[in-house]
Image (cartoon, helix red, strand yellow):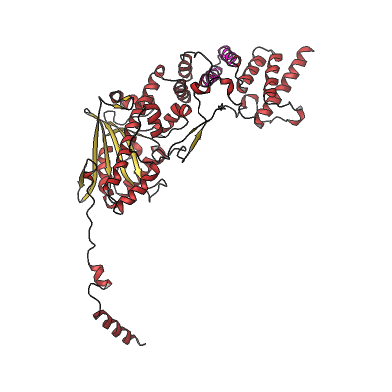
Amino acid sequence: MPIDDIVQRLRQLNKKLPVGVMRASDLILQEAPRKDPPDLSRFIPGEVHSVGEDTCFVSEEFFPYDQFFGNYPLQSLCNLDAVRLAEVFGLELGQPDGKILFIDTETTGLAGGTGTYAFMIGVGSLEKEGFLVTQYFMRDFDEEPAQMALLGEEIKKAALLVTYNGATFDLPLLRTRFVFNRVRIPLSEIPHLDLLPVARRLWKPAYGAANLSFLESKVLGSEREGDVPGSLIPHLYFQFLRGASPQTMAPIFYHNRMDIVALAALTEQACRLHIDPLSASNLWESLGVARYYDSRGNLQKAIEILESVPSPSRWTVEWHLCSRYLALLHKRAKNLERAASIWQSAYQSGFFDPLISIELAKYFEHTEKNYGKARELVIEVFSRYNQKPKPLDQFQPDEEETEDDLRYEYIQVRSVRRRSVTYSTMSDDRDEDDLPIIHSDRFDSNEIGDIASCDLPHWTERLERDLNHRLQRLIRKIEHSRS
């Protein structure tokens, strides 16, 4: 068909368009209808804030200091101070007079990168009237510029930022969103405390997990009502964007508020424990604080903390681990006699620990020169594992490895009575504990009972090789002393 006939045919079709049908060229010229954002204030206390022509929804809630958060008195939050936190956890403050801001985000996913949005950003701060939680929420993606601008103005007042796993997720995400919205906030220049490593060291050994809402229940005694699992939060937000009732977002606002209050309370608890280790409620907390000071190079402080722990009425798993760690600290401090006395007490407790036996064997060999006693201890380790020593020619020592370089792979003592800790997956702290079901070996002196009921640590090739070399060397020394 000639081109002229095609053009003529199309013109005739355009004249016959049904009523209500528009040509594409005319449709493009029309402005798209603008849908008003839903009214959240009917279900969530807050109001719309404007930044120029942009808007976003902001919700504020006060928690008076005379109230309790579970078993935790909120009045204790007044003990928090930016300078004190910085000194305890080794941070440098740029503006000591600024606020401590506790930040937690709710996002459209956990992948990070440019495709992930922080649709809700909660910020907690200490005010005269109480603990204030401010939540910046974008009702649609076009409200992100106002959200980030308002958040940026708040962060400019901060002396210190506190997050839970924020070093690897929240702050990098916020930094990306600030850049995309052309908000210049130098987050990297503001001191930042990520509480997750601290919480893992203090409370995970006792409770088996370090999820924020989990520790809120175990440490603070606060049980949430009407909370939503973190894994469902992105799904609920997308439902809201597609037209679901604003009431859908109410549990998410509640979840975010509780996370921020729990973060502040746990921060104060952790700070108090590091300032006053004697206030620890259990041996696990004392051990966690001692490990922290040891990692900072303050060996004597770590020794003082564990030496001040009163001896329990019976030998428990946590007391055994504290004693073993204390002995290793004394060994590094060249206090061999004190270390040996602790090893002797642990050895006589009735619980077999190969590390204790080997350390005692080293002490008898190198300090006491009691090669026979050292040999008995090494042979006992073999017999406990139903293993037999091997001839020397089957184990050739590494030329680059000395006795002091040997490290053991059996530090962790595992309870034979395993308890499953089950809880819904949460996306609030992005911990490695964020799995649908968590099965964790938990130490609890009230449930384990006698420490002798614990499993032996794993028999490893490294342990076997070290024991055989040690035994052969002791045999040679015994023969040499007799000749």
Question: At which x and y percent is residue 309?
Answer: 46, 15
Q: Residue at x 65, y 26 (%)?
A: 402
User: Is 439 placed left or right of 49 in the picture?
Assistant: right
Residue 439: x and y in percent read 51, 35
- As drawn, 299 above or below 18: above
* Residue 156 visible in the picture: no
Residue found 53% across the figure and 20% down from its top: 449
Q: Quadrant of residue 400?
A: top right
**Is 39 positioned to the left or the right of 421 in the image?**
left
Please state, as top left, top right, bottom left or bottom right, where the N terminus lies in the image: bottom left
The percent coordinates of residue 129 (x first, y second) are: 21, 28
Magenta span: chief secondary structure: helix
What span is in magenta?
Answer: 320-346
Q: Is residue 141 left or right of residue 380?
A: left
Do we see residue 405 in this rendering? yes
User: Which residue is situated farthest in the right direction here?
Assistant: 483
Q: Is residue 249 magenta?
A: no
Q: Which quadrant does the C terminus fall into?
A: top right
Return the residue nearer the eye: 190 or 142: 142
Q: In the visual, does 197 lie left or right of 162?
A: right
